[in-house]
Image (cartoon, rainbow, N blue to C red):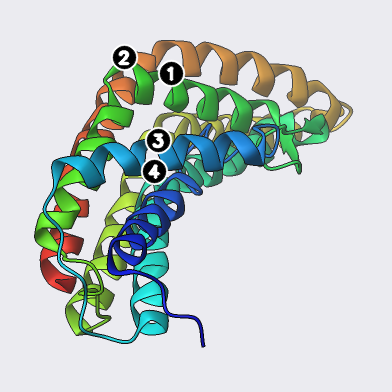
Amino acid sequence: MIELPAETLKFFLVFLRVLSVLFLIPLFSLRQVSFLFKVGFSLALSNLIYDRLDLELPSSPPFVSISGEVLLGLLVGFLVRVVFAALSMAGEIASLQSGFSFSRSIDPYSEAQTSLLVELKYLLAMLLFFAIDGHHVILKSLYESFSLVPLGGFSLNEGVYELIVRITGSTFAMALKIGSPLVVSLFLIEVSLGILSRLVPQMNVFLEGIPVKILASISILSLSLGLISPLLTGLFFSLEGNIASLFRGSG
């Protein structure tokens, strides 16, 4: 078995943690972004972190340390991705009710078929994420992680599991709040169309209702942007605390 020099092993562990985090965060994880660019950017960032910190070589076997660093980085990336996944779910539910689900296109991010509302909410979240310097929060948390969780010091325990479940549950609850104005309004429109179909049986409510629901969806979504933006901002601002809790619970 080849034994790496101590300094080389320490830098390699730093690089794995950085690369694992960046591998899952929005925009950077796009398949259109070159793999060489991802590796090169991760190497540059790892070099900056390594030069500024006095890191100690872990006492655990190299394979265990490597696995721990990769898993820790993926968990941090997961905490960021789950916010965007919850928003996509809220947009998909609204699309099914409004009729936008009939028209689908290829999402360049996931390379899967998505509806217009899903794309709109995802782009809105992406713009807000960078507008409030959410990427700076991730880089800051990544730098501070080496003080909270030393190299090779990550361990899965009951606290980590509980934190992931709690954060996932609260994030999806917030996504329901974000989508509630549109979902509730479309439900009331469905009820109204159902009553109208009983009063005027000759009317094809299904065909006539689609333009009404699409127009209502666009109008309600435009009016509710003032409510959605603060909720999204609160979700992104809570990322720093959630990531720090993950580090404190696993270190």
Screen quadrant of the C terminus? bottom left
- Name the kind of residue labelled 4 in the image: Ala
Q: Pick whichever of labels 2 and 1 is earlier in the sequence.
A: 1
Q: Position of residue 242 (x, y in %)?
A: 19, 52
Q: Pick whichever of labels 3 and 2 is earlier in the sequence.
A: 3
Q: Residue at x 61, y 42 (%)?
A: 92
Left or right of 102? Residue 228 is: left
- Name the kind of residue labelled 3 in the image: Ala
Q: Pick whichever of labels 3 and 1 is earlier in the sequence.
A: 3
Q: Position of residue 70 (x, y in %)?
A: 42, 66
**Residue nearest the viewer, comparing 120 with 215:** 120
Q: Pick whichever of labels 3 and 4 is earlier in the sequence.
A: 3
Q: Is residue 183 above or below residue 221?
A: below
Task: State the residue position of label 3.
Answer: 44
Q: Nearer the viewer, mark 3 or mark 1?
A: 3
Task: State the residue position of label 1.
Answer: 127
- Dot 2 alpha-carbon crowd within 10 angstroms: few under 14, some 14 to 19, many 20 or more: few
Helix, strand or loop at disc 2? Answer: helix
| Any part of residue 100 in sight | yes
Q: Would you say the residues marked 4 and 1 are in contact, meaning their CB atoms lie under 8 Å apart?
A: no
Q: Residue at x 64, y 13 (%)?
A: 215
Q: Would you say the residues marked 3 and 2 are in contact, meaning their CB atoms lie under 8 Å apart?
A: no
Helix, strand or loop at disc 3? Answer: helix
Task: State the residue position of label 2.
Answer: 226
Left or right of 140? Residue 25 is: right
Task: State the residue position of label 4.
Answer: 175
- Dot 1 alpha-carbon crowd within 10 angstroms: few under 14, some 14 to 19, many 20 or more: few
Mark pair 3, 2: CA separation: 39 Å
- Name the kind of residue labelled 2 in the image: Gly
- Name the kind of residue labelled 1 in the image: Leu
